[in-house]
Image (tube, rainbow, N blue to C red):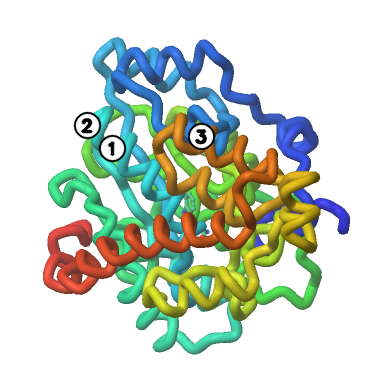
Amino acid sequence: MEQKVNPYEVQGKIDYDKLVKDFGIKRLTKSDLDQIKEIAGELHPYLRREIFFANRDLKWCLDEYKKGNQFFLYTGCGPSGPLHLGHLTTWIFTKWLQDKFDVDLWFQFTDDEKFLFKNKSYEEIQEWTHENMLDVIALGFNPKKTHFLIDTKHAGIMYPEAIKVAKKITFSTIKSAFGFTDSNNIGSIFYTAMQTVPAFLPNVLRKEKRPCLIPLGADQDIHFRISRDVIEKLGHKKPAIIHTKFMPPITGIEGKMSSSSAGAAILTTDDAKTVKKKINKYAFSGGQPTVEEHRRLGGNPEIDISYQWLRYFESDDDKLKEIYDNYKSGKLLSGELKVIIIDKINNFLAEHQKKRKNAGKLISQYIYK
Ligand code: TRP
């Protein structure tokens, strides 16, 4: 399947070298990582494992930080359905950045976007906005430094800035960037302007000039490819970006995890039995058809979803390496590897769901006022 990566479609086996070239972004270098380590004291496993792998202007952002000009973080969530592990991993890393750098995070919920792009009612999208906020809060972001922006609720402060952005982007740019046609609704054409605003709105509200750093899934890059120049023309600095790869779906390493296809994703609300069932039944295996062959030929961790997911959930490098080696040599069987990942995910989710239950009471602390 041909590689496709844009906010509305991710398909094929992703060639990240090609993506870096096509998007005009830069791989994270050793010196980028050293600079992060110098400030953070350590490197998050997602950086050590090249899960976060590319950037725009990260060096500038870190240089400013070292001079005392702290950046703010900006990321977001499109609330159109239940969240899955792929969503959470990006935000787990965002929380790490918030903690290590002790900075503000502006978190956008794009209820407008999902209403415009999905075949769902406004009311339904509002319910998902609420549900998704619970998951974000459960991850433990610092409530004093985290500010939720909900597009339709914060329209009063966002819209004046959004029209300034929109005025500098043509219909033809949007059409060719997203492959829109004359039958797209007119709201979807405007939407990129809304996603651009939080990259500089905090500076407008607080009369500051801080750099902005956006952790995002690489599929979201195009919005900012379009708007970084516009942001600069409006008198603000271009935001820096740090890109993550896609957590693969349960069915194999092509595309990305998505809630849209049933069974393909582990949802944040799945109970232990469901997780076990999904993984045992669907998780694509890099093992051999029989135990005898597996012992003789070994498994292939590169395509094995249980192993690939373990890279997100086993933070101990030595343990991960041992599992890799044992699987590759045939010592560890597919079924045994599945037991390991099921256990890891269920431990994580038990904790997450406990915090999620308590999150409703905290929402008002997070919403920007
Ligand atoms: N459009 C994103 C989505 O559908 C949500 C989003 C809004 C976002 N602002 C962002 C994602 C900034 C990353 C960075 O999920």
Q: Is residue 217 something one can see in this rendering?
A: yes
CA gap, disc 3 and disc 1: 15 Å
In the structure shown, which secondary structural element does the residue marked by tag 1 occupy?
A: helix
305 or 165: nearer the eye?
A: 305
Task: Tell me the residue at 13%/47% (across/down).
Answer: 144
Distance from mark 3 CB to nearest ligand 1 atom below 8 Å: no
Question: Where does residue 304 sit, x and y in percent of width and height?
Answer: 67, 53
Three-letter amino acid code at disc 2? Asp
Question: Where does residue 243 sit, x and y in percent of width and height?
Answer: 55, 38
Q: Which mark is residue 98?
A: 1
Would residue 89 be found to the left or right of residue 357 on screen? right
Query: Mark 3: few, some, or many residues within 10 Å (few <14, many ≥20)?
Result: many
Q: Which mark is residue 241?
A: 3
The quadrant in which the C terminus is found is bottom left
Q: Nearer the viewer, mark 3 or mark 1?
A: 1
Q: Give above or below for 76 relative to 120.
A: above
Q: Determine contact: label 3, label 1, CB under 8 Å.
A: no
Q: Earlier in the sequence, mark 3 or mark 1?
A: 1
Q: Earlier in the sequence, mark 3 or mark 2?
A: 2
Q: Which mark is residue 102?
A: 2
Q: Is residue 234 something one can see in this rendering?
A: no
Query: Mark 1: few, some, or many residues within 10 Å (few <14, many ≥20)?
Result: some
Distance from mark 2 CB to nearest ligand 1 atom below 8 Å: no
Task: Tell me the residue at 48%/30% (across/down).
Answer: 47
Q: Nearer the viewer, mark 3 or mark 2?
A: 2
CA gap, disc 3 and disc 2: 18 Å
Q: Determine contact: label 2, label 1, CB under 8 Å.
A: yes
Three-letter amino acid code at disc 1? Gln
Question: Where does residue 261 sit, x and y in percent of width and height?
Answer: 64, 77
